[in-house]
Image: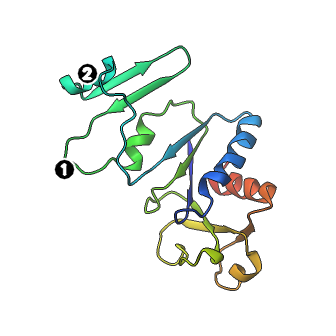
Amino acid sequence: MKVFGIAGTSGSGKTTLLDQLIPRFVASGLRVAGVKHTHHGFDPDTQGKDSWRMREAGCANVVLVGARHLTLMRRYEEGAPPPELADALAVLPADTDLVLVEGYKHSDVPKLEVYRPGHGRAPLWPDVPGIVGVATDAPGDVAALTRLPVLDLNRIDDIEAFVRERAGL
């Protein structure tokens, strides 16, 4: 299982880039999984439904299974440290070829930063470990700021090839 991350500030285009990359990897025959980290709390369940009631009764894990989906809901106690990337990777099927991670920017997996200078935010690459390249809408300007490989966000073929090479595919 190869793991590769997409990092960037909010609104930089991480999800949009993944929307373009995932179908390409899948079309080439890879079994792709995605891990999305959010700092915002969320509940994937619906209050009052059977699975919600099982969790409320005390189940640490509830698996919700339908005709085409399986969802694992794991409860973490209030005040417990948040799940790490390794926790998410541990529940993925062993036959997964590539895991694309959005978020977990401080993890030690190789990452491509999506950076848009026009958004007025500082780049992550000087301070965040594991960034191996930058995809941007201003490649000429960004190339003057870093020694990292710089890719044009509009050249998805180049980005796909870069991810394949850096992920070891």
Q: Is residue 25 left or right of residue 15?
A: right
Identity of the residue drawn at 53% across and 78% down? 122
Snapshot quadrant of residue 77: top left
Identity of the residue drawn at 71% across and 72% down? 150
Q: Nearer the viewer, residue 158 or 108?
A: 158
Q: Which residue is mark 2?
A: 53
Q: Is residue 146 left or right of residue 42?
A: right
Q: Amino acid at mark 1?
A: Gly
Identity of the residue drawn at 65% across and 69% down? 134
Identify the secondary structure beneath mark 2.
helix
Q: Residue furthest bottom?
A: 144
CB atoms of marks 2 and 1 within 8 Å: no
Q: Please, is residue 63 above or below residue 103 in the view?
A: above
Few, some or many C-alpha atoms within 10 Å of disc 2 (few <14, some 14-19, many ≥20)? some
Q: Is residue 34 left or right of residue 155?
A: left
Identify the secondary structure beneath mark 1.
loop
Q: Quadrant of the N terminus?
A: top right
Mark drawn on residue 79: 1
Q: Position of residue 137 (x, y in %)?
A: 73, 70
Q: Nearer the viewer, mark 2 or mark 1?
A: 2
Q: Is residue 115 left or right of residue 85?
A: right
Q: Amino acid at mark 2?
A: Arg
Q: Please, is residue 35 above or below residue 146 in the view?
A: above
Mark drawn on residue 108: none
Snapshot quadrant of residue 118: bottom right
Q: Position of residue 65 (x, y in %)?
A: 45, 17
